[in-house]
Image (tube, helix red, strand yellow):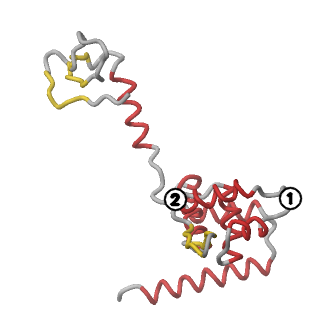
Amino acid sequence: MRLAPSTAHSAESKTHKVLMPKSPLPSRPQVENVNIDGPFLRPYTFHMMKRKLMARPKRPLPTNAEQVILNALWDLKEGTVDDVVTQLPASPPANYKTVQSLLRILEAKGFVRHTVRGRAFLFSPKMTREEVGGNLTKNLLERTFQGSCSALMMNLLDAHDVKDEELDELEALIQGYRERKKEQAPE
């Protein structure tokens, strides 16, 4: 039940007019004065504050199961539900209806699209691996590392045994990024 306080209020009495849901009883009034210091509005106010603090990302992220389906679809480029089922790892075996449901969810989220070919639906990715990976990385960066790229990189390096060749490759990638950034900067 959502209750929305109206703008009319009295400073002296500390009350707000609150719209109440319709009651099957005819004697119940539609508008009641509620003490704003009382327990009635506190849960509503707290709930609204919590919703603002916990805003959802602009683009939904795929779940683990959806990510497995996306990986199979990226490898195939396009395919029917049966094609995706056969592309998935054999252990544990994939259920046709589950894959079909996950493809529909991915389509609703904007990750895949379908075309009709005969009687079959042909699914294809709408987003690339890089786009989804970028969204996942951005979400991880913001949620876990408060936007600090260096903290993310150090965590990655500390958590894995990184070979010297990979460190050299990372240094070259960082140097190339710096050069591209200088070229794009207005002078």
Q: Which mark is residue 91?
A: 1
Q: Earlier in the sequence, mark 2 or mark 1?
A: 1
Q: Amino acid at mark 1?
A: Ser
Between 86 and 157, the residue placed more toward the observer is: 86
Q: Which corner quadrant holds the N terminus?
A: top left
Give the answer, above or below, for where 138 lies relative to 9: below
Q: Amino acid at mark 2?
A: Ala
* Residue 133 as seen in the image, left or right of residue 2: right
Number of numbered discs: 2
Few, some or many residues within 10 Å of mark 1 (<14, 14–19, 20+): few
Q: Which mark is residue 152?
A: none
Q: Position of residue 145 (x, y in %)?
A: 58, 55
Q: Position of residue 126 (x, y in %)?
A: 54, 72
* Residue 84 as seen in the image, left or right of residue 148: right
Instruction: Name the residue carrying label 2.
Output: 108
Q: Which corner quadrant holds the C terminus?
A: bottom left
Q: Quadrant of residue 85?
A: bottom right
Q: Position of residue 51 (x, y in %)?
A: 42, 40
Between 149 and 32, the residue placed more toward the observer is: 32
Q: CA distance from mark 2 to mark 1?
A: 27 Å
Residue at position x 63%, y 55% in the image: 101
